[in-house]
Image (cartoon, rainbow, N blue to C red):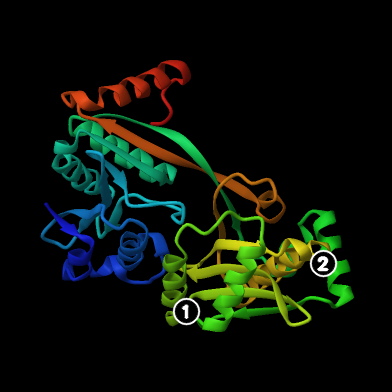
Amino acid sequence: MYHSTIAEALADPRLSALSARGAASTPFTRLDWLALLAAECLPGQHCSVAVAHEADDALAALPYRVEKGAVHGLANWYSFTAGPLLHGATPALAPALLAAIARSLAQFGAVSFAPLGEPEAALLATAFRRSGWIGASRRSDTNHVLPVNGRTFAEYWAARPGALRETVRRKRAKGRVELRIATAFDPADWAAYEAVYACSWKPSEGSPAFLRRFAQMEGAAGALRLGLALIDGQPVAAQFWTVEGGTAFIHKLAHDDAATSHSPGTLLTAALFERVIDRDKVALVDFGTGDDPYKRDWMDTTRPRWRVEAFRPGAVRHWPGLLRMAARRLVHGPASD
């Protein structure tokens, strides 16, 4: 059982599998993503990885940051998930490894991890409770996803709402919008993306430097899918997707409000779905967190995202948080397990 800074974790050969891309990896479970997030979005914060491992190389790792004396998941608004990382740990061994990590964090008195998938939330909440914490999980957000289920794009598209399909048919027929999808990072393409974002309805970007470096990293790995829509040579819509582990992740999308009548964003989204379904052969498209109504036109189902909170009974400074958690459970009942 040990704790490492993110930089030390990157250099730790025992953790090399947590930076590897593979059949089950995502950007948010890779140490290189976490290192970039810590450097660009959380400067000055204490960001670490707690690791418990067995002699047979089975391990559990829990990335975290410390803020105001409490432990939080190493995540921000760019993160689709943020929780325990497991490698080679059997279902029987994983709870014991995570319980060891939970005991090692007792000095902080309070923890909060989000967003988590339901299985990860249940596993983490149980680990903290078994280690002397008072903890619970509650639903915190919604994740829209599309299980492709072996369909072609044409089959997927036939199941979309009629109004959406008609919009794409009409706007394509007019031929005003040119579409491009880049798989390698190009500074000119990224400048076009940033220009579109600046003209869109979106709030100012939280960390432009992080997003650019992430796009460069994904481009170098062949995982970038940067879509641009242009009218008369000028970019009017842009979307930043990546493909990894059989999943297409939709990170950012924006369009110039002045071009709304041409529906460039809708045309670009359709083109990117066609690309990842028919050419990249993904099994899932993940639209991240947030229950935005427009996502329902494109996706087939939702998954809950959870927050795990836990407190040490003797940590007096965190009793207000413990009381709030207890009050929620009295009002709404147990949220999980």
The residue that mark 1 highlights is 219
Q: Residue at x 54, y 81 (%)?
A: 183
- Point 67% across, 65% down: residue: 151
Q: Amino acid at mark 1?
A: Gly
> Disc 2 marks which amino acid?
His
Residue that extends furthest to the top in the rendered view of this protein: 330
Q: Position of residue 21 (x, y in %)?
A: 37, 72
Residue 280 visible in rendering: no
Q: Circle 2: is it few (<14), some (14-19), or many (20+) Cα within 10 Å? A: many
* Residue 91 visible in this rendered orientation of the protein: yes
Instruction: Please tell me whether residue 326 is drawn above or below residue 251 in the rendered image.
Output: above
Query: Where in the figure is residue 56, as x and y percent of width and height?
Result: 14, 62
> Please, what secondary structure does the residue beneath circle 2 have?
helix
Q: CA distance from mark 2 to mark 1?
A: 29 Å
Q: Is residue 148 left or right of residue 59?
A: right
Residue labelled with disc 2 = 262
Determine the residue positioned at 27% across, 50% down. Answer: 64
Q: Is residue 301 above or below residue 56?
A: above
Q: In what quadrant of the picture does the C terminus appear?
A: top left
- Percent coordinates x, y for residue 292 in the rendering: 64, 46
